Image (tube, grey):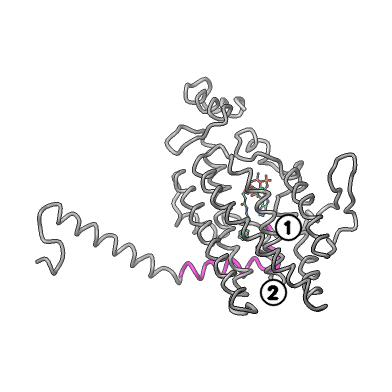
Amino acid sequence: MGAVVTAEVAGSAQVDRFDAVIAGEQRIEPRDWMPDAYRATLIRQIAQHAHSEIIGMQPEGAWLTRAPSLRRKAILLAKAQDEAGHGLYLYAAAETLGVDRAELTGKLVSGRQKYSSIFNYPALSFADVGVIGWLVDGAAICNQVPLCRCSYGPYARAMVRICKEESFHQRQGYELLITMMRGTGSQRRMVQDAVDRWWWPSLMMFGPPDGASPNTARSMAWRIKRHTNDELRQRFVDMSVPQARHLGITLPDPALSWNEERGSWDFGEPDWSELERVIEGDGPCNTERVERRRQAHEDGAWVREAALAYAHRRGAEGDRRAAGEPATEEER
Ligand code: BYC
């Protein structure tokens, strides 16, 4: 750990303190000194995470107007609103590191920052809403619960609240799938088809295999990440197999088999070239997702301008009151 940091400012008291905080499982806070690379890594990860929450509203959002009942529509609306909230907590956490939300949004819509590969796949039927809740939110929980122990305080605290909400998201998805599996043959086929399409992309959410993950070692040393990509992927598979059995669906991996010695499930190799392509912008929906986000940002310009004008007016009124002058037209 020390070696990573000390390369930057050898022997300084600031470095010693930073290293001690990390080693002592305490939290780095916004005003604390931190190495530039630690700050840059956090900005990269938190921004990508925030972008994923916001872009992540799109696949399911497509079903808001077509939900099969009022109950399902209310649930889906609440879930999409939660994702927007998660994005906001995360952008706020990123801002404590000295970056501006507008700048981060600019980088997303111009393709200079990433978001999770998973949201570049289409949601083709209402069963996809259930499978996104079960598998995508399930993978998110596996990945994000350890982030509640991240060494950077504002990120760790944001994750506590996010994880509580994500666990409801996962349960609503699973409950929807149980309901559909108890329904007609064609509903069961819809669920199986959705699982077939989302299983492998869900495994890819955890990132490249450890041997091809340039950031893991340093992020683990800094206790930003607490487990490697492969460890979390395994945890997710072990969690999902019994749930799939309970649902009565088949996971689309002929290599899945229980490994008595490891006490874990063996599973097949995801197509890593597909992950690379999707990350590079060549997934089924990349262009559409970013374009939609760019359009929404432009459409919202008048709201930002109005909010800013209102804040300036309130500020000017406050200044006049403080100076003992009439603040508004009515007061004059
Ligand atoms: N998609 O060295 P690695 C949600 C990039 S939100 C795209 O292993 P790291 C939800 C990676 O960024 C889900 N890019 O990186 C929302 C890096 O590129 P750069 C989002 C990926 O950071 C709404 C390069 O590949 N969750 O769940 O150590 C509704 C090499 O990777 C992906 C988070 O953001 C990917 N799948 O580990 C429902 C969680 N994988 O930046 C659900 C927080 C890798 O060097 N993030 N890349 O150019 C993390 O835990 C980590 O950043 C990752 C990657 C495990 C994702």
Q: How far from the left and from the top, in percent, is residue 36? A: 51, 36
Principal SS element in the magenta part?
helix
Q: Quadrant of the N terminus?
A: top right
Q: Hey, what amino acid is under mark 1? A: Ser
Residue 206 image point, x, y percent: 70, 50
Picture residue at 15% right of the left edge, 52% below the top: 322
Residue 202's disc number: 1
- Residue at point 63% right, 43% down? 146
* Quarter of the view holding residue 102: bottom left
User: Furthest residue to the top?
Assistant: 11
Q: Could you say which is closer to the camera, residue 123 or residue 102?
A: 123
The relative height of residue 259 versus residue 192 in the rendered view (above or below) is: above
Q: State which region is magenta.
A: 279-298
Residue 4 at x, y percent in the picture:
61, 29
Q: Quadrant of residue 25?
A: top right
Q: Which numbered disc, 1 or 2, marks the residue closer to the eye?
A: 2
Q: Is residue 218 left or right of residue 202?
A: left
Would residue 10 be found to the left or right of residue 190 on screen? Answer: left
The label number, if any, that marks residue 37 in the structure image:
none
Do callouts 1 and 2 mark residues in contact (Cβ within 8 Å)? no
Task: Quote the CA–CA distance across marks 1 and 2.
Answer: 18 Å
* The stretch drawn in magenta includes residue 302: no
**The C terminus: image quadrant:** bottom left
* The magenta stretch spans residue 288: yes
Q: Quick one: label 1 or label 2, which is nearer the N terminus?
A: 2
What amino acid type is highlighted by mark number 2?
Answer: Phe
Q: Residues within 10 Å of mark 1 (few under 14, many from 20)?
A: many
Q: Neighbour class for label 2 at 10 Å: few (<14), some, many (≥20)?
A: many
Q: How many numbered markers are drawn?
A: 2
Q: Which mark is residue 126?
A: 2
